[in-house]
Amino acid sequence: MRSEAGALLVLGGTGFIGGAVVRELLRPGSGGAPPPELRVLARRPLPDWMTSAGARRIPADLTDPDGLRGVCEGVGTVLHLASYVGRDPALCTAVNDLGTRAVAREADAAGARVLYVSTASVYGGGPHRGVTEEQLVPAPVSAASASRLRAEETVLTRGGVVLRPHLVHGPGDKWFVPLLYRLLRKVPVWPEAGGSRSSLVAVRDLARVVAALSRSDWAADRGTVYHVNHPRPVTLRAMVTQVCRGLDVPLPGSDLPRAAHRELAARVLPGLSAHQHALLTEDHWYESSRIWRRLGIEPGPGFAAGLVAGLPWYRRHVAGLHLV
């Protein structure tokens, strides 16, 4: 018997996506109804804005399965937004794979349902053009993505829901727009005229989806995967134009074939992986309209408006980047 009316437990609630989801969950519901009881699993104290709004910290760590015992007691829905995305294979396994298994066991014991925010990177290398959730077989190329795919499998086999966004932007983003900024500063050249297209989603819009699902009936969603992006893909040229305008970077003045652009980028940005370069310069866009229809909500205005909302964050963040 599922206790869906119980508390919400958020994993990763102090991170980039998780923080946006917690903000969304703490907003009053329709008709001014108070938000549900909200618990946030975290190793460290929660920020004041969370606790003052009523969130309660559950001290635990995904790398310590024994310490997770009982964390789902009284919980109806687990929102799993915690992922390790670095390059340490041991941490990928400990956090994304084994940590998810441990949480899933606790959710099973409590009769709680689980939603997991994964990534379209589980599909591996592109190009990907307008594919639906059923048209691609995952083939991850990194330890992080492979372990997140295993986390997906854990959740799906238990009747949970998995969300796969692609590139997420907004306040708190330390990867997508900052990486594009570094690339523009070090390699001010268009790769093949900037014609590649990508699926993007503002972190606030992704949070709206998670919050809406947390309030909805999942009877027809058990074991379902959804792409969560704005339905309209964005060209690299449009992305770069907006980023250059917002962060005071000159537009590229020349053009190279993608392979030559990759070779140049590898010389001046050795930390940029071939997969990261491909994500920015090859087609990676996914049919993403199904989730918006399912929830009956609008997907938001798109990248340009979302970038404007995040500019104060991005300006502070890139000011501290070392571009050597």
Image (cartoon, rainbow, N blue to C red):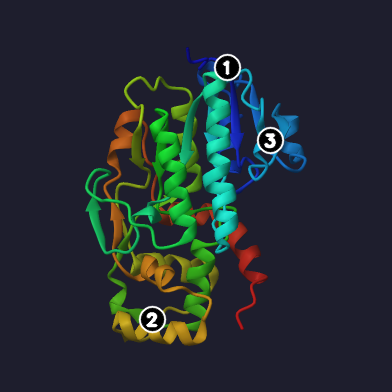
Residue at the image position 70 percent from the left and 29 percent from the top: 53
In primary-sequence order, the first of circles 1 and 2 is 1
Q: Position of residue 17 (x, y in %)?
A: 55, 46
The residues tagged by marks 1 and 3 sit, at their Cα atoms, a distance apart of: 23 Å
Compared with residue 249, is residue 311 higher up or lower down, i.e. above or below?
Answer: above
Mark 2 vs mark 3: in front: 3
Question: Neighbour class for label 2 at 10 Å: few (<14), some, many (≥20)?
Answer: many
Residue at the image position 35 percent from the left and 31 percent from the top: 223
Residue 66 marker = 3
The residues tagged by marks 2 and 3 sit, at their Cα atoms, a distance apart of: 45 Å
Question: Neighbour class for label 1 at 10 Å: few (<14), some, many (≥20)?
Answer: some
Secondary element at tag 1: loop
- Towards the viewer: 81 or 72: 72
Q: Is residue 226 left or right of residue 186?
A: left
Q: Amino acid at mark 2?
A: Arg
Q: Amino acid at mark 3?
A: Asp
In primary-sequence order, the first of circles 1 and 3 is 1
Which quadrant: the C terminus?
Answer: bottom right
Q: Position of residue 240 (x, y in %)?
A: 41, 69
Secondary element at tag 2: helix
The residues tagged by marks 1 and 2 sit, at their Cα atoms, a distance apart of: 50 Å
Question: Neighbour class for label 3 at 10 Å: few (<14), some, many (≥20)?
Answer: few
Q: Amino acid at mark 1?
A: Gly
Mark 1 vs mark 3: in front: 3
Residue 6 marker = 1
Residue 262 marker = 2
Q: State which quadrant residue 52 falls in.
A: top right
Mark 1 and mark 2 residues within 8 Å of each other at the beta carbon: no
Mark 2 and mark 3 residues within 8 Å of each other at the beta carbon: no
- Towards the viewer: 114 or 158: 158
